[in-house]
């Protein structure tokens, strides 16, 4: 399992560590309108999953804004999701205030389905750790980054390069 710290303290990740070459695990999260979202909803597209602890923190805010900006250059065959345990209502409010119009925020608050399927659920905090996953149109994982310190930024350039390599 990936080793991660949160504010320099070790945390326990629950679930299965995902590796490059794996078939992407399915999950069920909630869209801002409370409708279910699964992996199959975007089948046939390239997916980037940007996982954050909470949109209401500086790094998570910056990460979501950065991927929203990058999305304009990635084409219609790419879907970017930001996954957190924030409530769908809070995500919708945050997106409106931040002007997020391309990245889709989805909430894993109800079942922690994504968190456990991708091994990003922090047991001690009931939050998701910071991570990025790229999944190709055939549901194969092509890029994985579990950010070692959950309060640090991910490697944006590497994640975007992984998406562009599939486009």
Image (cartoon, rainbow, N blue to C red):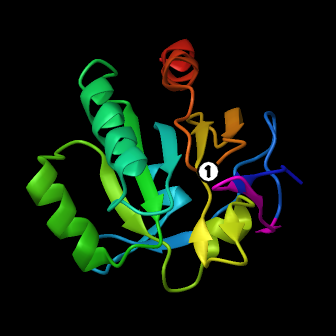
Res 62 → quadrant = top left
- The answer to whether residue 24 shows anywhere in this view is yes
Report the front residue among 4 and 159: 4
**144 or 129, which is in the foreground?**
129
Quadrant containing the N terminus in the rendered view: bottom right
x, y percentage for residue 154? 56, 34
Q: What residue do we see at 72% from left, 65% from top?
A: 117
Magenta stretch: residue 13 in it?
yes
Give me the residue at 77% from left, 65% from top. 11
Magenta segment range? 6-15
> Quick one: which residue is furthest to the right in this view?
1
List the single residue furthest toward the front.
8
**Residue 54 or residue 16, whichever sits in front:** 54
Does 141 sit above or below residue 18? Answer: above
In the rendered structure, the answer to whether residue 83 lies left or right of residue 93 reads: right
Q: Left or right: where does residue 86 sit relative to residue 102?
A: right
Left or right: 120 as drawn, with respect to 74: right
**Label 1 residue SS:** loop
- Residue 122 occupies quadrant: bottom right
Percent of width and height locating residue 31:
33, 70
Q: Report x, y in % for residue 17.
A: 82, 54
Q: Nearer the viewer, residue 49 or 25?
A: 49
- Please give the name of the residue rendered at 50% of the width and 86% of the height, measured from the top-left corner: 110
Residue farthest to the bottom, as pictured: 110
Q: Where is 31 relative to 156, above or below? A: below
Q: How many marks?
A: 1
Residue sitting at 67 percent across and 45 percent down? 149
Residue 37 lies in the magenta-colored region: no
Picture coordinates of residue 90, whole percent (x, y): 25, 74
Which residue is disc 1 drawn over?
150
């Amino acid at each position: 399992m990936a080793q991660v710290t949160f504010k320099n303290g070790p945390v326990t990740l629950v679930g299965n560590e995902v590796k490059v070459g794996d078939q992407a695990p399915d999950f069920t999260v909630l869209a801002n309108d409370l409708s279910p979202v699964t992996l199959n909803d975007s089948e046939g597209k390239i997916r980037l999953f940007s996982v954050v602890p909470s949109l209401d923190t500086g790094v998570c805010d910056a990460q979501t804004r950065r991927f929203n900006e990058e999305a304009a250059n990635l084409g219609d065959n790419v879907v970017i999701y930001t996954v957190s345990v924030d409530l769908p209502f809070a995500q919708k409010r945050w997106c409106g205030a931040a002007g997020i119009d391309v990245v889709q925020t989805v909430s894993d608050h109800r079942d922690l389905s994504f968190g456990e399927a991708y091994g990003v659920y922090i047991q001690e905090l009931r939050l998701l750790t910071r991570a990025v996953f790229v999944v190709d149109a055939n549901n194969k994982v092509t890029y994985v980054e579990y950010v070692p310190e959950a309060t640090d930024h991910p490697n944006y350039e590497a994640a975007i390069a992984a998406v562009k390599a599939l486009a």
